[in-house]
Image (tube, grey):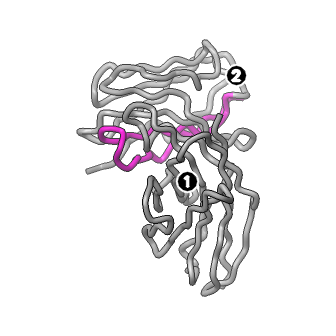
Amino acid sequence: DAGVIQSPRHEVTEMGQEVTLRCKPISGHDYLFWYRQTMMRGLELLIYFNNNVPIDDSGMPEDRFSAKMPNASFSTLKIQPSEPRDSAVYFCASSRQGREKLFFGSGTQLSVL
Amino acid sequence: AQSVTQPDIHITVSEGASLELRCNYSYGATPYLFWYVQSPGQGLQLLLKYFSGDTLVQGIKGFEAEFKRSQSSFNLRKPSVHWSDAAEYFCAVGAHAGGTSYGKLTFGQGTILTVHP
């Protein structure tokens, strides 16, 4: 299996632009998680899905952030409009039935100038 | 609310020396505890976990951790460190929310491990 695949690996954008991060979970995994890693706040859970349905989005920082999972093999995290404080590494992770090992993607390094 | 504290931001050890990374947690019930490792530019990889039972748990790459409820600690240990162990290590606590014991995690700030030859 190819593991959790995230794209792009790096994204540089200007403040005010829309940013879309993409994630392909491992086939057969029914839980998908979006985490954000910053120097100041460390690793934070933003949102997670079960069977494509958002279960808990309490970690989403504000309305500028939205996440979707239109099918079992694809999820997006969108920031609109982006701000410099959104600069971080965004990780996607998936697991099977939520009680098995969590597999992380390699992350998307986002820089908002 | 649950929280995790890793008191050491950066630890340096010599190759072959023993290692102990500290982790303290705060959680109202029996915690689910994890240690993850992150190599530069990579995602996190699970080293080991504690759910219940034996308080000394073995993980991959020769790591082990001991759960001490009285001290609210879950320290990671390795008897002999290899240069390839240089990475950042994260302790995490999980809440059993539905089926997401492994996924809905609160992480510590991480400890960077440097290994000298």
Can you say whether B73 is above or below A50 in the image? Answer: below
Whether labels 1 and 2 belong to a single chain: the reply is no
Determine if the magenta segment contains residue A68: no
**Chain bearing mark 2:** A
Residue at image position (44%, 36%) is A7
| Mark 2 residue crowding within 10 angstroms, few (<14) / some (14–19) / many (20+) | some
Highlighted range, magenta: A86-113
| Mark 1 residue crowding within 10 angstroms, few (<14) / some (14–19) / many (20+) | few
Kind of residue at badge 1: Gly
In three-dimensional space, the C-alpha distance between marks 1 and 2, rounded to whole angstroms, equals 23 Å
- What is the count of numbered marks? 2
x, y percent for residue B78: 56, 76
Kind of residue at badge 2: Glu
Q: Which residue is mark 1?
A: B41
x, y percent for residue A107: 51, 43
Q: Which residue is mark 2?
A: A83
